[in-house]
Amino acid sequence: MKGVIVKEPGGPEQLTMTELPKPETEKDDLLIKVNMAAVNRTDIISREGKAGYASNPILGVEVAGTVAEADSSHSFAVGDRVMGLVNGGGYAEYAAMPASRAMKIPESLSFAEAAAIPEVFLTAYQTLFWIGKLQENDTVMIHAGASGVGTAAIQLAKQLTGAKVITTAGSERKLRFCAELGADVTINYKEQPFDKAVLDATDQQGADLILDFIGASYWEKNLACINMDGRWVLIGTLGGSELKNVDLMNLMSKRIQLTGTLLTPRSDAYKAALSKEFSDKVTPYFERGIIRPVLDSTFPAEQVDEAHLHMEANRNIGKIILNMESDDI
Amino acid sequence: MKGVIVKEPGGPEQLTMTELPKPETEKDDLLIKVNMAAVNRTDIISREGKAGYASNPILGVEVAGTVAEADSSHSFAVGDRVMGLVNGGGYAEYAAMPASRAMKIPESLSFAEAAAIPEVFLTAYQTLFWIGKLQENDTVMIHAGASGVGTAAIQLAKQLTGAKVITTAGSERKLRFCAELGADVTINYKEQPFDKAVLDATDQQGADLILDFIGASYWEKNLACINMDGRWVLIGTLGGSELKNVDLMNLMSKRIQLTGTLLTPRSDAYKAALSKEFSDKVTPYFERGIIRPVLDSTFPAEQVDEAHLHMEANRNIGKIILNMESDDI
């Protein structure tokens, strides 16, 4: 089969499609004929050789496709349409997926839409509810609202809890889109200091929960606009990770809970439990079209380098998809 | 009545005992005839004018004494022996205490022992269980094991969960005492790097929970010896609060939950709920002598300056008590 690997750690030019053996499945794995894979930041970090935890030489942590081989003891049959996280190996014609984390694709969705769901919706669900304990009357601040996780988080927060959603983005086009998804307050961080805007939107109380993909460059402003007893979930460091001056007293006096998290390196059991709860709770919203995966663009698999460049330029609204069944593979 | 106030923000010499009106009680308050008050770090911070949240000019956040006036709607009667947190005003002959947070003094305990309980045991209980979510099979790292909160936390962790308890202190005398209270592993931080000792004691896994009173000076070592998914509760900054270099990636890759907390500025409702749960769960352990308050020394109230100096010198094991009924007042 064809699959995308990295020649040497480095830029998108290091990505190459090559002939590889089909993945070997272990007991409790499904073999998936991949229709669509999706691009994630974690793939870029792996490509650069900085991830540390990626053991599969083939990139890609999520796919949508059909079951090609299934252990009879599982609830999936050959031919079922499924989506889910894989332990690497997503950018390929076939991928092995633990059956425990496979999710049935809602009937109303295409493979491309389904491939846009697992990583960002599971990350958003995990950070909003499992880690962030979002409650009905909370205000949540979602940075990078037009990103993959951002668009998922806005919808989940709004539809599952009715919390007040504040989001930042860097263009009017992105902010309009966030508002359409349900964001109550949208802030163009290039035009005004977002901390002041958050305080103004919350009676000077601040946000109860912050989803932070940015890290260092937003540190001071996040501190300034988080509420007492606020939860601050750190899931990315697009704005750098190194802080020069931190006063721990600020964390104490506001009683802040700061939690770092990454989804990809978590255990199989964690991913299975998260996938099951998410699928049970959110599938009805997909079926009724109330929550929707957000697709930016679909690239044929052989243009995977273009797809990575597109993500690194921050030009996308929503997910970038790789078509693993395009004619040229 | 007599009470201790601060002339000007500064050192212990600024403490002065003076004649003041009895506190006015509000609805739902008890008036307590104070027998013993206890000294806390927060009193020193207030004395230095750095607390910000202390509105009562009289220092002191916890007392043990007898009920002098009780609203008939409450479950306490005049003459009952009670202990608990007050909103300032503890270093005095009389103090007002919200009835919702008053705790009956276990029969086997003296007033001095009772005054040694509320602040440190409630802080330890809150940080171990409410914030730190300590579980049966966890390893907990308790810094400053011979301090007030340290001695309470060692006993609560050991008796209520059976978790493995690792503690640090700076002298063999203190370490022996921690071991007597139940600590499984004791580390003299002056003689060896505690992070390596923690890793060696946990199969190189690290501690699942850290109670950190130290802050900046222990930051790197705490990071090095906390386990994946570890909880890190920051409740003091005896080693400074300013960090020069923090790499947020470390919080993400270990998925650390770092929570800052302070007990004194929390709401009445919070203190009431915490006091009630603690009293219900832990009183039987006090009654049976399985858990015990740890007294370092008792000073007559007019030697309050000596009591503060004693705490600031870190010479104490356990609590420093002020006798508010000594003859010279």
Image (spheres, coloured by chain):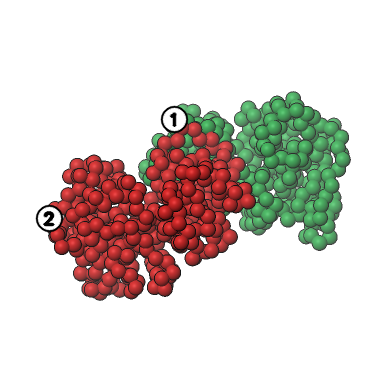
Chain colours: A red, B green
Residue A290 lies in what quarter of the image? bottom left
Is B214 above or below relative to A304?
above
**Quarter location, residue B197:** top left
**In terms of image quadrants, where is residue B178?**
top right
Could you tell me residue A66's position as x and y percent? 24, 69
Taking the image as drawn, is residue B127 in sight?
no
Q: Give the amino acid type for the residue marked by disc 2 in the picture.
A: Glu
- Single out the mark in the foreground, 1 or 2: 2
Q: Is residue B166 left or right of residue B53?
A: left
Q: Which residue is mark 2?
A: A19
- Mark 1, residue position: B192
The N terminus of chain A, quarter of image: bottom left
- The residue marked by circle 2 belongs to what chain? A
In which chain is the residue bearing label 1?
B
Mark 1 and 2 residues: CB-CB less than 8 Å, in contact?
no
Measure how far apart labels 1 and 2 are at the Cα level: 54 Å
Q: Would you say B319 lies left or right of A245 here?
A: right
Towards the viewer: A308 or A121: A308
Q: Does residue A155 lie above or below B219 as drawn?
A: below
- Residue drawn at 23 percent across, 69 percent down: A67
Label 1 packing within 10 angstroms: few (<14), some (14-19), many (20+): few
- Res. B31 in view: yes
Identify which amino acid the numbered label 1 is placed on. Gln
> Which element carries disc 2, helix, strand or loop?
strand
Q: Nearer the viewer, residue A251 or A66?
A: A66
SS under mark 1: loop
